[in-house]
């Protein structure tokens, strides 16, 4: 079964940067719209960024600080996170969806991002 593997998380000080990666083991991943989500302790999972073939979208909470991109040759989607804030602390997950909005993969383990001084 195809899984997505998230990586790149860690501990960073406020104002710092991290780049997360979401890697798939199948080439058709490159044709899907891909989403980055995050879930903070005690909170629901929230969508923070989406990339399709032609567009990118961001939640208001990360707009201007995060950038989503993809390398289709590597079947990988990235989330560059700059100017990190303590409220960005969460486990970050990726997934993909089809044209009907149906999620396509099981959730992976996620990658922990902790922003703290």
Image: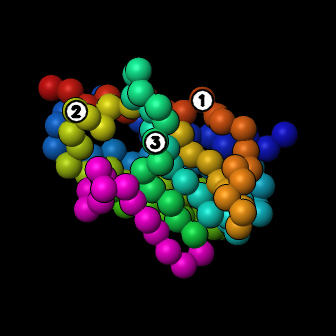
Q: Earlier in the sequence, mark 1 or mark 2?
A: 2
Q: Looking at the picture, tell me which residue is in the foreground, 100 or 66.
A: 100
Instruction: Classify residue 76 as left or right of residue 98.
Output: left
Quadrant placement of the N terminus: top right
What separation in Å lies between label 3 and label 1 (alpha carbons)? 16 Å
Instruction: From the image, tell me which residue sits under label 3.
Output: 46
Locate residue 77: give its quadrant.
Answer: bottom right
Q: Is residue 60 magenta?
A: yes
* Rendered image: mark on residue 109: 1
Instruction: From the image, tell me which residue sits under label 2.
Output: 86
SS type, badge 3: strand
Magenta-highlighted residues: 53-65
Q: Looking at the picture, tell me which residue is in the foreground, 41 or 6.
A: 41
Q: Is residue 28 magenta?
A: no
The residue most toward the right is 1
Residue at position x 57%, y 69% from top?
Answer: 52
Where is residue 62 shown, x and y percent of the image?
30, 53
Q: Main secondary structure of the magenta part?
A: loop
């Amino acid at each position: 079964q195809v899984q997505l593997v998230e990586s790149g998380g860690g501990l960073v000080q406020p104002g710092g940067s991290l780049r997360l990666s979401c890697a798939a083991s199948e080439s058709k991943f490159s044709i899907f719209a891909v989403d980055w989500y995050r879930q903070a302790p005690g909170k629901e999972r929230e969508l923070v960024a989406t990339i399709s073939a032609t567009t990118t979208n961001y939640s208001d909470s990360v707009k201007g600080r995060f950038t989503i991109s993809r390398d289709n040759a590597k079947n990988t989607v990235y989330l560059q996170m700059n100017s990190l804030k303590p409220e960005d602390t969460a486990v970050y997950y990726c997934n993909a969806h089809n044209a009907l909005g149906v999620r396509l993969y099981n959730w992976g383990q996620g990658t922990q991002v902790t922003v703290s001084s």
